[in-house]
Image (tube, rainbow, N blue to C red):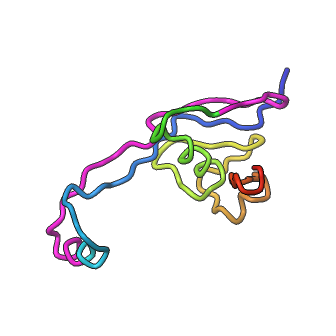
Amino acid sequence: MKQTMVQVNNVTVRYKIANDRVSSLKEYIIKKIGKKITEKEFLALDDVSFTVEKGDVVGIVGANGAGKSTLLNLLSGSTIADSGKIYLDNLDVTKMPEYKRAKYVGRVFQDPRVGT
């Protein structure tokens, strides 16, 4: 029997996006404080579940806006799930801050200038 290394159960990540066009951050903040801006909800990940077992090789492929970066941000802890659970090596890291989660997750960012 293989050992489960990553388990993501029913994870959802929501973002709020302004419906109104604003020309600057200052204008957005003024409208937001004055409750003159409306927002809509955007589901970056909707009820996502998967398991990665020891020895598995996994590729994450999708179109722009499909949620690839959100998923990796979620695993590393730089994004927190609105619902669901994340386990790394059977440890629940769902609410664990990024700096603590770094003990369990390594990450290399793409930089075409250096060949990554």
Q: Nearer the viewer, residue 108 or 92?
A: 108
* Residue 58 percent location from the top left of the image: 72, 30
* Residue 79 percent location from the top left of the image: 54, 55
* Lateral position of residue 111 relative to residue 22, left or right: right
Question: How many numbered marks, from 0 up?
Answer: 0
Residue at (30, 55) in percent of width and height: 17
* Magenta stretch contains residue 33: yes
Residue at (43, 43) in percent of width and height: 44
Residue at (64, 58) in percent of width and height: 96
What is the quadrant of the N terminus in the image?
top right
Which image quadrant is residue 7 in?
A: top right
* Residue at the front extreme, as displayed: 113
Residue at (70, 52) in percent of width and height: 112
* Residue at the left extreme, as displayed: 36
* Residue 75 percent location from the top left of the image: 64, 48
* Residue 82 percent location from the top left of the image: 46, 49
Vertical comparison of 55 with 27: above or below: above
Part of the protein shown in magenta: 30-59
